[in-house]
Image: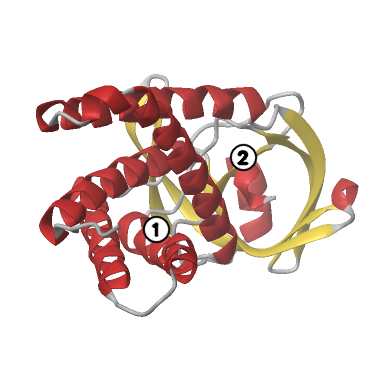
Amino acid sequence: MQYELYIDVFFLINAIMDWMLLKITGKILSCKVGKMRILWGAFLGAFLTCIVWSIPGIPGILKLLFFYTFVNVVMIQAGLGIRRSRELVRAFIVLGISAVLMAGILSLFRQYIRYGSLFFGCVIAGDYLAGGILWMLQQLFRKKFGTCKIRLEHAGQNYDGKALIDTGNRLRDPVSGEPVNILDPEIAECLLKEEIPQMREIAYHSIGKENGVMKAFRIERMIFPEKENMVIKNGLVAVSEEKILCEDCRMILNPDIF
């Protein structure tokens, strides 16, 4: 049995699906990228998919393997701007789960998808439903609030105290995409002393302040004694505009650093 493949229709369908999946993945991972970049990633993914499937003589299993590895990774990097290996793995997993959910949801509408005029409506409905399910799973399994001991070392100065692991802190550097921790201004002053490090500005939103800006710098070492003396070197730390005193903690950690 032979099938005819209309490459233009195949490309359009894949581009739409890739755009939906990248949008869901970016929302779950709080990736701050523009719509045009996501669209570019989707078009690139669809283009590579068409290239792979149009090459003759390659077994279907190899094409599937190439698609679900290389094409997806390129699509994530292009559409969401993710480069670091740890974040790339997370995005790869979320994209895969999103694809499975989307496939399952669209199978419910299979009898309607045969009518071309209803295809786009089914895809949009599936997009919202899959996004809602993933959001609920994220809320269910996300890390809980907690505190931990921390030791900060910078420019010959030390600070030993407690830090709050706050799942609400999803602050990231807009340039590198790295997670940003928040430090009490008094502690920052003690660590920096007379040193004036290279600062960068981190925009943030909080209750009562929609367009805030904090100064951030790279701290030499953050040590976590309760986590097998885990050490983070040159982590990004933003200096809070107000004093932090929550459960005797003087620092708010982004859970994504662990």
**Residue 249, position as x, y percentages in the image:** 73, 32
Which quarter shows the N terminus? bottom left
Q: Disc 2 to disc 1, how far (Cα)?
A: 35 Å
Amino acid of disc 1:
Ile
Q: Which residue is mark 2?
A: 184
What residue is shown at x 63% (from left), y 23% (from top)? 140
Q: Is residue 191 visible?
A: yes
Q: Nearer the viewer, residue 75 or 183?
A: 75
Which corner quadrant of the image does residue 10 belong to? bottom left
Q: Nearer the viewer, mark 2 or mark 1?
A: 1
**Residue 146, position as x, y percentages in the image:** 75, 30
Q: Which mark is residue 128?
A: none
| Mark 2 Cα shell of 10 Å, populated few (<14), some (14-19), many (≥20) | many
What residue is shown at x 78% (from left), y 33% (from top)? 147
**Residue 53, position as x, y percentages in the image:** 30, 67
Q: Nearer the viewer, residue 125 or 74?
A: 125
What residue is shown at x 26% (from left), y 31% (from top)? 123
Q: Is residue 75 above or below residue 118?
A: below
Q: Residue furthest front?
A: 1
Q: Is residue 134 above or below residue 68?
A: above
Q: Residue furthest bottom?
A: 57
Q: Which mark is residue 76?
A: 1
- Label located before the other in sequence (2 or 1): 1
- At mark 2, the secondary structure is loop
Residue 159 relative to residue 75: left or right:
right
Q: How is the image coloured?
A: secondary structure
